[in-house]
Amino acid sequence: MKKLISLTGAMMAVLVSFSVYAQDIPETITVTSSVFEHHGMVPVENSAYGDNTSIDLAWSNLPEGTVQLALICDDPEVVTIGMMENPFVHWVVYNIPASASGLPAGMAADAEIMGDGLDGAINGHNGLNRPGYFGPRPPDNGHLHAYHFRVYAIDADLGLEPGLNKDQLLEAIDGHVLATGMLMGHYQHTE
């Protein structure tokens, strides 16, 4: 029975992810960071091998009608190379006010975010089931991993509660996403 529940949950996660991505959602938001360019290397201090400090992010070109924003950072490479069945989730942030122009570096891992124009924003649960940022930490095999920092423009204040993970967030914002944008960083670790 436990396997069936697990399988059903995994199938729901795939369907929800597919539903959010299957919509004709424009990818028009520009997402940048001061620490690496798109397709650049995430610095070691922003990895779990270093200081595990969250990167700064900035975004622009939000569509008209944006009320809130959300961010999901995951590593889909773990699926491609057969390490995991689903992308590993490194960061989930939601209820970000549309007036915010980005996230500062070194954000606290507290569930509720205060200051920097982010009051009301929430650090959701990462792949370790903890709130906040968890930096790249691929195995020591030297394989290059990709980290997708995807921003979602949302058309309503959904009043989402603390504690959501990636799949729960995608389900909650389904049908409310106006546009997305992504910054991709890479990281590899060798002994």
Image: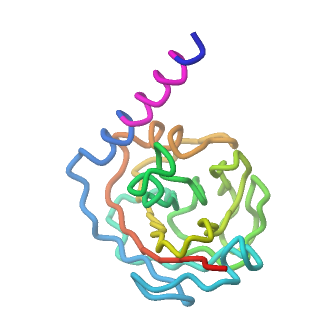
- The residue that appears at 46% across and 21% down in the rendered structure is 8
Q: Quadrant of residue 100?
A: bottom right
Work out whether 55 lies above or below 124.
below
Work out whether 29 lies above or below 71.
below
Q: Main secondary structure of the magenta part?
A: helix
Work out whether 126 lies above or below 113.
above
Q: Quadrant of residue 31?
A: bottom left
Total number of numbered discs in the rendering: 0
Work out whether residue 59 or residue 120 is closer to the camera in this orientation and state it. 59
In the rendering, at what x and y percent does residue 188 appear? 54, 77
Work out whether residue 48 or residue 67 is closer to the camera in this orientation and state it. 48
Quadrant of image for the N terminus: top right
- The residue that appears at 62% across and 71% down in the rendered structure is 140
Q: Is residue 91 left or right of residue 146?
A: right
Q: Residue furthest top?
A: 1
Numbered range of the magenta stretch: 4-14
Q: Quadrant of residue 20?
A: top left
- The residue that appears at 60% across and 41% down in the rendered structure is 160
Q: Residue furthest left?
A: 24
Residue 13 belongs to the span the image colors magenta: yes
Quadrant of image for the C terminus: bottom right
In the rendering, at what x and y percent does residue 142 appear? 53, 76
Residue 145 belongs to the span the image colors magenta: no
Work out whether residue 172 or residue 47 is closer to the camera in this orientation and state it. 47
In the rendering, at what x and y percent does residue 131 appear? 72, 52
